[in-house]
Amino acid sequence: VAWLIGWALILEYAVGAITVAISWSGYFVEFMRGFGVEVPKALCNGYFATWVDAAGVTHHGLLNVPAVLLVAAITTLLIVGVKESARATSIIVLLKVIVVLIFLALGVGYVKPGNWQPFLPFGWSGVVAGAGVIFFAYIGFDAVTTMSEEAKDPKRDLPRGILASLAICTVLYILVSGVLTGIVPYHQLNVPAPVALALRAAGVNWG
């Protein structure tokens, strides 16, 4: 049973890492576009991604280079040492929370309540399908338990840490989803960088 759980965790983290790396790649491409640098589609999409050009020719992606480089950079950081990766993680988490709060502060004034009508466009089946996707947002909370040896009082501190981080992330997730779909209709958000799209729609091009 332990062997199965171990491999299930490896699969969980692999799938989560793939998803996050691809999403990060989308935002990186948008970021570079803001500086006038256009990353070729073939170099930021996998082979199964296809698109049709103006001449009607179908193209395939070659390799998502930004995603690969991100995974390589994080792997290198992990190899360097635990202290360094822990420090980097703390900085990244702080930056992410700041970015989320900035997005909420900038975007809340551009929310159009009409975009929330109907509130459940796909009914409860859509809610269940969505729940199957956002579980990626909750991958990693179980990793807090691996730090139990570092806690002064694991029985008290670990449950508090896990539940508090779950609560904070859930609230931020709901707020970002609400503002995001309030600025841009949900059917327009199927893009690699939806937050960047929403900010551009709100007129915040530097975002």
Image (cartoon, grey):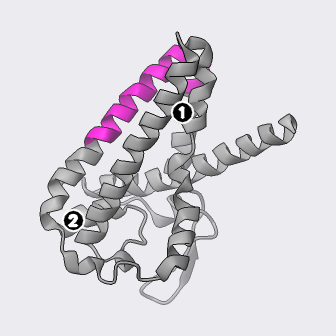
The residue under label 1 is: 74
Residue 165 lies, in percent from the top left, at 43, 36
Q: Main secondary structure of the magenta part?
A: helix
The residue depicted at 22 percent of the width and 81 percent of the height is 114
**Helix, strand or loop under label 1:** helix
| Residue contact between numbered discs 1 and 2, judged by CB atoms under 8 Å | no
Compared to 12, does 182 lie above or below? Answer: below
Ranked by sequence position, the earlier of labels 1 and 2 is 1
**Helix, strand or loop under label 2:** helix
Residue 198 lies, in percent from the top left, at 26, 65
Magenta stretch: residue 93 in it?
yes
Compared to 58, does 6 lie above or below? Answer: above
Q: Amino acid at mark 1?
A: Ile
Compared to 122, does 45 lie above or below? Answer: above
Q: Locate residue 203 relative to residue 77 in the image: left or right.
A: left
Residue 196 badge: none
Q: Locate residue 55 relative to residue 31 in the image: left or right.
A: right
Residue at the top extreme of this rendering: 152
In this view, the residue in front, 102 or 23, is 102
In this view, the residue in front, 49 or 110, is 110
The residue depicted at 15 percent of the width and 55 percent of the height is 106
In this view, the residue in front, 173 or 106, is 173
Give the magenta part as a residue range. 77-98
Q: Amino acid at mark 2?
A: Arg
Residue 49 shows up from this direction: yes
The residue under label 2 is: 200
Quarter placement of the N terminus: top right
